[in-house]
Image (cartoon, rainbow, N blue to C red):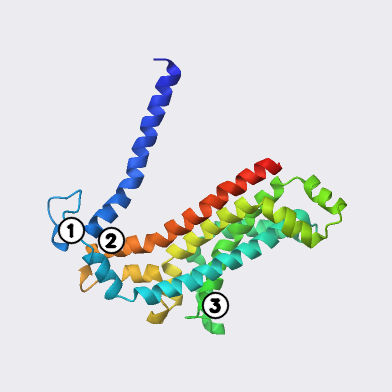
Amino acid sequence: MSSRNKVGRKGGLLVNSLAICWVFPVYWMLNTALKPRKDVMSATPKFFPSPPSFDNFRTALTQTNFAEDLRNSVIVVGATVLIALALGLFAAAALTRFKFRGRRTIMISVLIVQMVPPSALLIPTFLVFNKIGLLGTYLGLILAYLALVLPFSIWVMRGFFLAVPVEVEEAGRLDGASQWQILTKILFPLVAPGAVATSIFTFITAWNDYLIAYTFMQDQSRYTLPVWLASFSTPDKGTDFAGQMAASVLFSLPVVIFFLFLQRRLVSGMSAGAVKG
């Protein structure tokens, strides 16, 4: 066996080992969610649910505020993704295609804000929102998420805009296109893969957040799904492991669906960009 094949074999073994480490927790979550409750706390681990039971899913769906909290998450996360995408696109286009006073300062500010941990901004934001009456509102939570994800979105989108040659824009201008047409019909389609990647990051960040949602949404009827997921573990009753694993599967499904939905567009956008390049 040649040295190249040996290296390839070792590399494949390493990748497969890592894949097992990544996939096993997900498998165990699904396995626990499908187990009968008497088997969940058994001293002898069972690697397959026998027989599979959907009682844990039924409990998670009927005995909690799943539908209400799902609606809250969809409203807040959906608005955050759309606004962050629109603002990120236009802000990144302005920072890369136009020269204006303070542009360098803005770029440095965007970079610095990314380095600040979200927990450090939690108390000042809480005090400001409490002063202006945004605590407990959808708008307040959306603004808090935008403050969290927008700097990263702008920075990522800026990289994609810089990768587009200026000659492409100048060719559009020679053909008589206006600045708006150059942005919407030439530049935005070319940076579509970056927009998709930014949307995925924004969605996952806002969808998984617990700390900000729990702190800002003090009314239980406005809780989002991460707070709902934490309700399966209480100091007085302990942790409902079976219900929590079933709830975790339900919680993860929208993320998987969203990622699969956009993944096709991410790949097709990259292919289109390669052809145009």
Residue 135 vs 42, above or below: the answer is below
Type of the residue with mark 2: Met
Residue at figure coordinates x 21%, y 74% from the top left: 236
Mark 1 or mark 2, earlier in chain: 1
Type of the residue with mark 1: Val
User: CA–CA distance between discs 2 and 3?
Assistant: 31 Å
User: CA–CA distance between discs 1 and 2?
Assistant: 10 Å
What kind of element bears circle 3? helix
Residue 134 vs 78, above or below: the answer is below
**Front: mark 1 or 3:** 1
Mark 1 or mark 3, earlier in chain: 1
- Residue 276, picture quadrant: top right
Residue at figure coordinates x 55%, y 68% from the top left: 80
Left or right of 12 in this view: 159: right
Residue at figure coordinates x 55%, y 65% from the top left: 81
Q: Which of 114 and 210 is in front in this view?
A: 210
Q: Which of 99 and 240 is in front in this view?
A: 240
Contact, CB < 8 Å: mark 1 with mark 2?
Answer: yes
Residue identifier under label 1: 40
Q: Dot 1, crowdedness within 10 Å: few (<14), some or many (≥20)? A: some
Left or right of 228 in this view: 54: left
Type of the residue with mark 3: Leu
Residue identifier under label 3: 139
Residue at figure coordinates x 17%, y 50% from the top left: 46
User: CA–CA distance between discs 1 and 3?
Assistant: 40 Å
For the N terminus, the quadrant is top left
Rendered image: mark on residue 245: 2
Residue 140 vs 29, above or below: the answer is below
